[in-house]
Image (cartoon, rainbow, N blue to C red):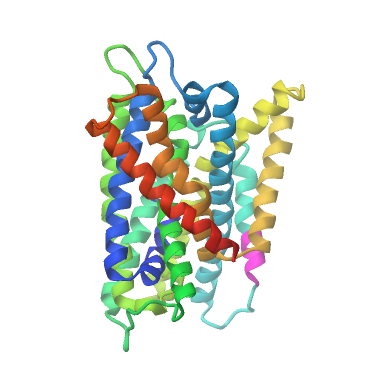
Amino acid sequence: MVGAGLLTLPYAMSELGWGPGVAVMTLSWIMTLYTLWQMVEMHEMVPGKRFDRYHELGQYAFGETLGLWIVVPQQLVVEISLDIVYMITGGKSLKKFHDLVCDGRCKDIKLSYFIMIFASAQFVISQLPNFDSIATISLAAALMSICYSTIAWGASVDKGKADGVDYSLRASTTSGMVFDFLGGLGQMAFSFSGHNVVLEIQASIPSTADTPSKKPMWKGVIVAYTIVLLCYFPVAFVGYWAFGNSVDDNILITLNTPKWLIAAANMMVVVHVIGSYQVYAMPVFDMMEMVLVRKMRFSPGWKLRLVSRSLFVAFTMFVGITFPFFGGLIGFFGGLAFAPTTYFLPCIIWLTVYKPRVFSLSWCTNWRQIILIRGSIFLFYPVCLQ
């Protein structure tokens, strides 16, 4: 649940300012915890059936064809864009580690080569067959995310407030402030992105009549969101407090001292995004191989896995090298697809399936969240097109 998007939260704060930034962070945590609870509850809402994929839940709510077209494109955008951003993040963190360790004594190496180095690890790990096979990698990634987020805000506290720190908004024009504000909303939406694979994760938990999977899954969610609270909020607020609007779109790029600690934190980021890349790539691999086998009659096996998964990794590497803009990509993708699948699509499915009484607490809560987030997205799109 703790994604590399937390590294851009101080930058998002600099686009929103103290008041709106604190409010959006708090509301995002509450809203996404609520929609995550909805998805955990809906996983086995039909007796004897488990909705192991997001699109299966959408098909049950909206129909076989419409549900597929509503959910799958958005889910693919989320998962592919995350892997592109993780490819860039891994490359940038490797470069930062190299630059800190060398301290000007080594030849300068382009970011493109570090992205290729990161991708080479993904070519190998992508051949692991399923979620269970990456459990150890995922655990290591989770531990690393906790460690480097602690280093990010701890090193910011140690450095203290920068001289002449400025908390005014980055932009000076009205259009620029509107664009930055909506970009900040997108970046925060990007940080809360675990919903897109939550059903696939819950599908790996055994379920019985006495102990349905939602019980241990919800316990896991509570632990995860407690860690999110302890990681996201200090990084966002302390990072912005220390650097103001001069903070980079990756807080670990802004920090330079102590060198050994920041270098270690960047390697932790690399380990984290290696695992996180796979968590979001696995559902894509599943969809690709299902289409190739069922629709195009390819034979399942290691050859198909080698070719299809390697092509996907190569694609994300190519896009990452071509568009290495960490903060800009996070804001764009966050507003485009992360907000719908994370903030309000579960609410729409809940209303469609359970049909709560009009003006009941459930009805009002879901509609309030849908209207609030949809309004933000309708503003986001035309600004992005300018």
Looking at the image, is 164 positioned above or below residue 235?
A: below
Residue 79 image point, x, y percent: 55, 44
Q: Number of marks in the image?
A: 0
**Nearest the camera: 16 or 245?**
16
At x 50%, y 33%, the residue is 131
The C terminus: image quadrant: bottom right
Span colored in magenta = 110-116
Give the residue furthest to the left: 361
Residue 62 image point, x, y percent: 50, 25
Residue 14 among magenta residues: no
**Nearest the camera: 68 or 110?**
68
Residue 114 image point, x, y percent: 62, 64
Q: Quadrant of residue 85?
A: bottom right
Residue 289 image point, x, y percent: 67, 29
Q: Main secondary structure of the magenta part?
A: helix
The N terminus: image quadrant: top left
Looking at the image, is 83 positioned above or below residue 159?
A: above
Q: Quadrant of residue 268?
A: bottom left
Is residue 350 visible in the rendered structure shown here? Answer: yes
At x 45%, y 76%, the residue is 174
